[in-house]
Image: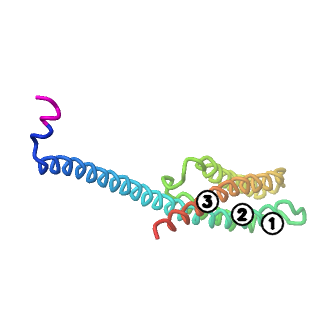
Amino acid sequence: MSLTTFSLSISPDAWIQTFGGFFGALLAGGIAIYLFKRQVNHEFRRTRIKELHNFLKSYYVLNDWIVWFLITADSITEMMEDDNNTIQYRIELLPYQLESLNSYMFQLNQINDDYIPQEIYKAYLEVKSIIAIFKKQCEVDLNIYQQGRMSPTKEIYRLQVKLLNRHKEEIDQYAKGKEEELKKLTNKEK
């Protein structure tokens, strides 16, 4: 039997059913793939939005406490650099400043590290380290003042504040980029 004879022996309804079933399956498969890809993209976008929200919430807390620390650090730095401030004045003021620094350290330790992205995690750790070192330096100087001596480490305070500001700027720039990314993703959702 030849191909022509074979094709003529099949009824037109069978041809329609065969090709209809074939094209219907292709169309259904295409729609299923399209919907699957769309669902995957939607889930990725939702997950990314959640990650960005979590980071930005942590960033806002981190930024607030860094700002408060910088205000206190500037006050301490000015007090330490001003030679007109007596040892007694420093002995009276430093314990209050140390209590503030303890509070900042406590609050910074409450931030969930999981929400800090790898790209700025080093800067985040540097911020925490600088604050801890700054606080320790205050404790050392307070001890020196209580012994009736002047501390020779006036410049270290200004240096630590500069370092902290540098890391804060790095974190701020990263956060600005993530705020813009979040705006774009949430605008696509609408």
Residue in the foreground of this view, choosing between 106 and 54: 54
Tag 2: amino acid: Leu
Amino acid on which the number 3 mark rests in the picture = Ala
Which tag, 3 or 2, sits closer to the chain's start? 2
What's the residue at 20%, 51% (across, down)? 20
- What is the x, y in percent for residue 164? 71, 55
Which residues are drawn in magenta?
A: 1-6
Residue 35, located in which quarter of the rendered image?
bottom left
| Secondary structure of residue under mark 1 | helix
Residue under numbered circle 1: 88
Q: Report crowding for label 3: few under 14, some 14 to 19, many 20 or more residues within 10 A (C-alpha).
A: some
Mark 2 is surrounded, within 10 Å at the Cα level, by few (under 14), some (14 to 19) or many (20 or more) other residues, namely: some
Cβ atoms under marks 3 and 2 closer than 8 Å: no
Q: How is the image coloured?
A: rainbow
* Distance between the alpha carbons at the discs numbered 3 and 2: 19 Å
Chief secondary structure of the magenta portion: helix
> Does the CB distance between marks 2 and 1 fall below 8 Å?
no
Residue at 18%, 50% (x, y): give it: 21
Which of the two marks, 2 or 1, is nearer to us in this view? Answer: 2
Above or below 28: residue 57:
below
Q: CA distance from mark 2 to mark 1?
A: 24 Å
Instruction: Identify the amino acid type marked 1.
Output: Gln
Residue 18 horizontal/vertical position (percent):
16, 46
- Label at residue 175: 3
Nearest the eye: 72 or 121? 121
Lateral position of residue 66 relative to residue 54, left or right: right
Earlier sequence position, callout 2 versus callout 1: 2
| Visible residue check, residue 106 | no
> In front: mark 3 or mark 2?
3
Question: Which residue in the protein does label 2 denote?
Answer: 70
Counting from the top left corner in percent of width and height, residue 190 is at 46, 71
